[in-house]
Image (cartoon, grey):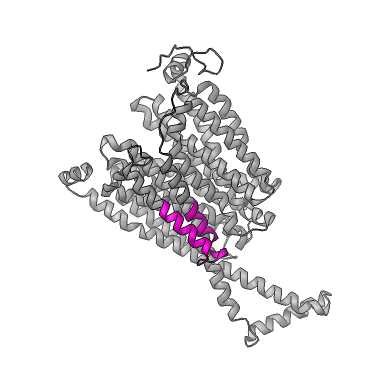
Amino acid sequence: MTSVNEPLSGGPFPGAPVQNAAFLAAHYGPAYRWLVTITGMVGVVSMVLAMTTVNVAVPDVMGAFGIGQDKAQWMSSAYMATMTAGMLLNAWVSGVLGERRTFIGALFFFSLGAVLGGMAPNEDMLIFARILQGFSAGIAQPLVMATIFTVFPAERRGSAMGIFGLGVVFAPAIGPTLGGLMIEYFSWRYVFYISLPFCGIAAIMGAFFMPTRPLAREIPPFDWLGFALLCVGLWGLMTGIADGQREGWSSDVIVLRLVLGASAAVGFVLWELYTPRALLDMRIFANLEFASAAVIAFIFGAGMMGSTYVIPVFVQTMIGFTPLLAGLMMMPAGLMLAFIFPLAGRLSDAMPASFMIIGGLILFAAGFALMVTADADTTFWTLVGMVMVSRLGLGFINPSLNATALKALPADKVRQGAGVANFMRQLGGAFGINLIVAFFEVRTRFHADALTATQDWGNRTTERLLTQMEHLMQRSGLPFQQQKAAALDFLATMVNTQAQMMAFSDTFIVIAIVALLALIPAALLSRSQQQSPVARLVLRRR
């Protein structure tokens, strides 16, 4: 083990002693725990802000680059997917570079991605910037959690993680509103710059308070094949799903991507079962209780991130909210979560966690069932109430789900279980946005075709509408040759708007149904928790 007084260039200045956690704790005293916690929280909050602020900018980006939602959604889904992959790189990178270099390096590349995103001349550069940010966030977030966990004594780790979690929850609550402010008074490009001051502060503090270690003399082994299979699987499946409607679901390129992605995903699972240096311990899914919790974690992530994306887009494109109003609409629900999480944590100690999860899923589904009734006449506060119902459900699910997933495992598997559960939640978030947008595109085309088929000269209502529009165009002074074309263009706009409204309703229904389907693994979880202690011991040993 490295001595705390061993000279090395591991400190902020050449010749400084190795500044591991023990050295820094002795140097700064009891305050060091909170100094490193604040350092990590500032860095992570900047990354969480970047994850949520861009959602209110989707309509503006679509207009700026002339793209549809199938392209614009990559601002969120590419970030989530690469963050999921980056989390698996965290342990290896920090083992090679040490915590401090890894933390500051992640902040540097994250900031570079923010600058590139704000200056992006086209959607491809914008997506690349989000990929860069996602990888950086994936590496930094587990590092910060592990560092905070290490510097606190065992009896105070719960409180420390609770404070850290409060910061992570608070950032998404204010993120959409900050994004709306930037768009309202500046431009959608400034949404990417919000995180830069936080990154700068975190990097300066990290140079002094994050622990470090000597550079590794030998590069430790890493499961590069497994990581490559995961990346190929994510790329093939997500791009195939996103581009399916535009390219055609039976087109050669889409079929090839989906087959390649599915094959790589299966290969990843099989390889992780075989290799001794697995990125993810797949054998942990043999535990029925943990497997059920992991499935719920995937659906939780999909619902959380998918709804965070689709609701701001809906209220801006269909109801006419400004980005600022869309952000303000999301804020009360986000702030509510900050109060619900501690309460839900206490309730999960007083009653079976499966009851909390089932209740949370029902509330989440109810919130989106209410969203089906939303239209252009729905008031601001009615929408706020609908969002709060769904978020209340998520607030009851999250603490109980985390506790249940880890309690189901023996002590020597808890660390791996925490990583797998977090991976499943992030993976659900990536695919949630991807699948929701793809479903919305399919249903928009379906309703547009169905409505267009009814718009012929045998339809008296359509005929009267076109005649009235032509008269209005004539009164406005439009030349005769353009009156009919303008009337038909107005009709096409009405049909497309109605098709999108119906597609949003279908999307909200499907989100609610998926949440209700999650009651199946929740019921299995409840049944497993009611087993006898002997049966549960046998299950854990498996």
Q: Which residues are magenta?
A: 235-264
Quadrant in which the C terminus appears: top left
Q: Position of residue 392 (x, y in %)?
A: 43, 51
Q: Is residue 57 left or right of residue 351?
A: right
Q: Residue furthest bottom?
A: 458
Q: Is residue 519 left or right of residue 247?
A: left
Residue in the picture at 33% in, 54% down: 358
In depth, the one of 250 and 75 nearer the eye is 250
Residue in the picture at 50% in, 67% down: 250
In depth, the one of 282 and 376 nearer the eye is 282
Q: Is residue 531 left or right of residue 139?
A: left
Q: Is residue 26 left or right of residue 43?
A: left
In depth, the one of 115 and 375 nearer the eye is 115
Q: Position of residue 127 (x, y in %)?
A: 59, 48
Q: Position of residue 11 (x, y in %)?
A: 52, 17
Q: Position of residue 351 (x, y in %)?
A: 28, 46
Residue in the picture at 75% in, 76% down: 485
Residue 64: tell me if it is visible: yes
Q: Does 68 appear above or below 297?
A: below
Quadrant in which the N terminus appears: top left
Residue in the picture at 24% in, 48% down: 529
